[in-house]
Every structure is written in C-alpha cells, then in structure tokens.
Amino acid sequence: MDGPEQATDEVRQMDVPVYNMTGDQVGSMTIDEGSLGGEVNPRLIKQAYVRYHSNRRQGSARTRSRGQIKSSNKKLVRQKGSGRARHGNRTVAQFRGGGRAFAKTRTREDFRQSMPRKMRRQANRNAMLAKLIDGEVKVLESLELSEPGTRRIVEALKALGVDRSALVAVSSRVDRARNVQLSCRNMDEVRTCRAADLNCFEMLNNRYLVIAKEDLEAWLTGPSSQTDKGTRGDPMDARGEESR
C-alpha cells in the first residue's frame, strides 16, 4: 500500500521590506500568500472593482421628457391642406428644444450591484496580493508627522521610489492621521484613505500603496481576514462597514 498522501499545497511566505521615511530599509515583515488567496484571481478582482465603481454612481443625470417641456400647446400647422407633415406642438423629440424620447430618470439605486461580503473581502485581499507581487506596496516603519508639511511627504515618496500615483493609507487614530492627511491634500496624484477601509477599488486606482507596518498588520488580521462561512454575525464584524 502506498503511504499517506502528502499535502501538495505549500505555505508560501513573502518577505516585504519595511522602510523609514528617508527610504532606508530597516527590516521586513512576513506575509502568508495563502491568507491573501494564494494566487491572483483577475475575474474576482474585476467583479469587485465593477461593483465598487457602479455603487459610487450618483444617478443624478436628468433630461426632460416631452411632458416636462414648457412650451405652447398650439398646433404648428393645420392638419390638412398645407402639404406638410402632420404635427402637434413643438415639444416632440424631433424638434429643436423639444423633449428627449427616452429621458434619463434613473436613480442611484438603479445602478447598485450586490456582492457577498465573503467575496468582497477575498477580492480586496487578492488585490493586495497582486500589489505585493508587483512590488507596489511600500511599507513604512511609522507613518506619522509631528506637524503638517507637504515637502516631507514629497521627499518621503521620492525616497521610496514612488514615481506614479499613490494611495496613502493612514491610521484610524485621528491624532496620527490628521497631519498626514493635511500634508497630502495638495498633491495631485496622492490620495488618502483609512487603512481599515482599504479595498480593491482604491488600491487599483493608484499605482502604489503606502502604508505603515502596524496598519497593514491590523488590516491583515482585522475584519477583512474573515472570509469563511462564519463571517456573518461575528463580533469582529460588528461595525459591518460597506467599504469592506
């Protein structure tokens, strides 16, 4: 008889370098690829991305139908004898200034898409895996400023090799996040968000992700890590934020 089957799935670990604000590597952190999905799933990421994008639509575009046009109801020409086509008033779609044949009246709710929470979180973590594989995640030892200063953020991003758009994930603590947010708001290609609210839409809309080691560890072990069947109703998920 053959011996017991050996597990074929190997636990793959990746070492992510940790930098300081001057761009020097001061350490590394180990991340389990299996906890992030093991391999990149483009279909899942796209489905989640389209869902996040669609749910951000305001649904505020409006055009007027024929009945909403304010105009005289007088008949243009007599019904017979003129040799012209038979028309009523000028509010019809074929006349300039008339209403639209299919007026836009859809609301925000008409564009919303649903996706199971488990799938959303798997997509978010899979997007993080894709960023890590491509080397587009810059982990800092600490992301905190004593006072607002755009120059410090510019110098830090340059030292980290960030030459394209970047998403700076700030701490959930207001005292740590405020100065960083004020420093980034004048930069065109830099966006900020709370580390707890990281999702695939925000990550994929920017080339680089800059995040503190503490915040990344909290995100990896926080509610976003609950992708099993016991996700619903777990105390860790008491907040139930839609962004995750």
Image: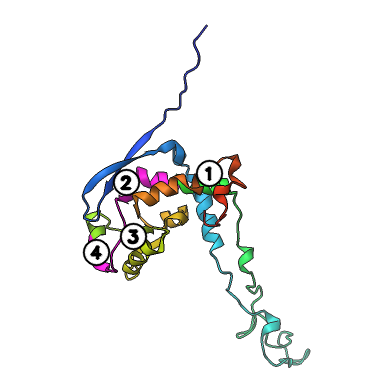
Front-lying residue, 58 or 174: 174
Q: Decide which of 223, 191 is in the foreground and name it.
A: 223
Which is nearer the N-term, disc 1 or disc 3?
3
Q: Mark 1: give few (<14), some (14-19) or many (20+) Cα within 10 Å.
A: some
User: Furthest-top residue in view?
Assistant: 1
Work out whether mark 1 precedes mark 4 in sequence or the reverse, and give the earlier one.
Answer: 4
Residue 186 point in image, percent of width and height? 32, 71
Q: Which residues fall within the magenta stretch? A: 127-155
Position of residue 119 relative to residue 87, above or below, is above
Q: Is residue 44 left or right of residue 213?
A: right
Mark 2 nearby-residue class (10 Å; few <14, some 14–19, many ≥20): few
Marks 3 and 2, the one that precedes in the sequence: 2
Which residue shows up at 23% across the image and 46% down it?
26
Q: What residue is shown with label 4?
A: 152
Q: Are marks 3 and 2 in contact (CB under 8 Å)?
A: no
Q: Which residue is mark 3?
A: 165
Mark toward the start of the polypeptide (4 vs 3): 4
| Residue at mark 1 | 226
Q: Secondary structure at mark 1?
A: loop
- Three-letter amino acid code at the position of disc 1: Gln
Q: Is residue 192 magenta?
A: no
Most extreme residue toward the right is 80
Q: x, y (%) of residue 238?
A: 57, 52
User: Amino acid under label 3?
Assistant: Ser
Across and down, in percent, residue 101 comes to 66, 75
